[in-house]
Image (tube, rainbow, N blue to C red):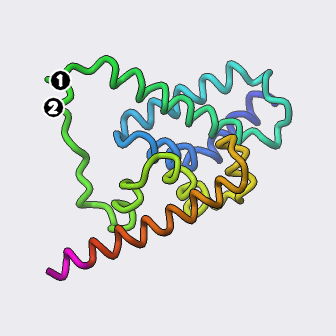
């Protein structure tokens, strides 16, 4: 893959990369940093990509790993004072569905976002997350049930 093809492929995947990073990291700035670091790592390790048709899947996996790395490093180095000073994200601008998705645990949330928002097939999600298709199906079913429960609970709370 040459430089021009790499740039074009990254630009085409940009929205997906951001959505995936947002499922793991809530801060917009950290999401942008994770995506940027992942793109740099991908370009540096482009020679390791065996087949160009799997570029987007490969890049998403790098973003996921980078997000986990950033989370791990960030939580290890924050003092209690720094942690308490962090403002919680303002979720009033987001839909009820977005809020419900953000309440899911990360493995379920990743499967839901990759399938229902990004449109990946079960097999593709399995390849990206390195899990069996059956596990993807299980996480999606669990996610649907949890979302239904959360949204029903929110509706009841609004009506009270």
Image height of 58 relative to 137, above or below: above
Residue 47, horizontal then vertical, whole percent: 80, 21
Q: Is residue 4 above or below residue 14?
A: above
Q: Nearer the viewer, residue 65 or 107?
A: 107
Could you tell me which residue is drawn at 70 percent across and 58 percent down?
A: 122
Say what secondary structure mark 2 lies in: helix
Mark 2, Cα crowd under 10 Å, few <14 / some 14-19 / many 20+, is few
Which residue corresponds to mark 1?
A: 80
- Count neighbours of disc 1 (C-alpha within 10 A) and say few if under 14, some if 14 to 19, many if 20 or more: few
Q: Residue 125: where, in percent of width, then height?
A: 67, 51
Q: Which residue occupies 50% across, 44% down?
A: 18
**Element marked by disc 1:** helix
Q: List x then y, in percent, for residue 4.
A: 74, 33
- Relative to residue 82, is residue 16 drawn left or right? right
**Is 104 displayed left or right of 63 in the figure?**
left
**Residue at mark 2:** 84
Q: Of helix, strand and loop, which mostly describes the magenta segment?
A: helix
Identity of the residue drawn at 57% across and 49% down: 16
Count of picture labels = 2
Q: Which residues are magenta?
A: 156-160
The one of 159 and 9 positioned closer to us in this rendering: 159
Label 2 with label 1: CB-CB less than 8 Å: yes
């Amino acid at each position: 893959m040459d430089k021009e093809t790499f740039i074009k492929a990254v630009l085409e995947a940009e929205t997906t990369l951001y959505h995936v990073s947002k499922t793991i990291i809530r801060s917009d700035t950290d999401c942008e940093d994770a995506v940027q670091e992942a793109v740099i790592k991908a370009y540096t390790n482009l020679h390791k990509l065996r087949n160009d048709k799997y570029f987007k899947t490969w890049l998403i996996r790098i973003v996921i790993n980078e997000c986990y790395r950033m989370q791990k490093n960030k939580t290890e180095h924050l003092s209690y004072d720094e942690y308490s000073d962090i403002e919680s994200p303002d979720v009033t601008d987001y839909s009820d569905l977005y809020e419900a998705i953000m309440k899911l645990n990360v493995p379920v949330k990743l499967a839901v976002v990759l399938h229902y928002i990004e449109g990946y097939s079960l097999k593709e999600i399995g390849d990206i997350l390195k899990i069996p298709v059956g596990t993807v199906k299980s996480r999606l079913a669990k996610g649907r049930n949890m979302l239904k429960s959360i949204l029903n609970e929110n509706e009841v709370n609004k009506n009270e």
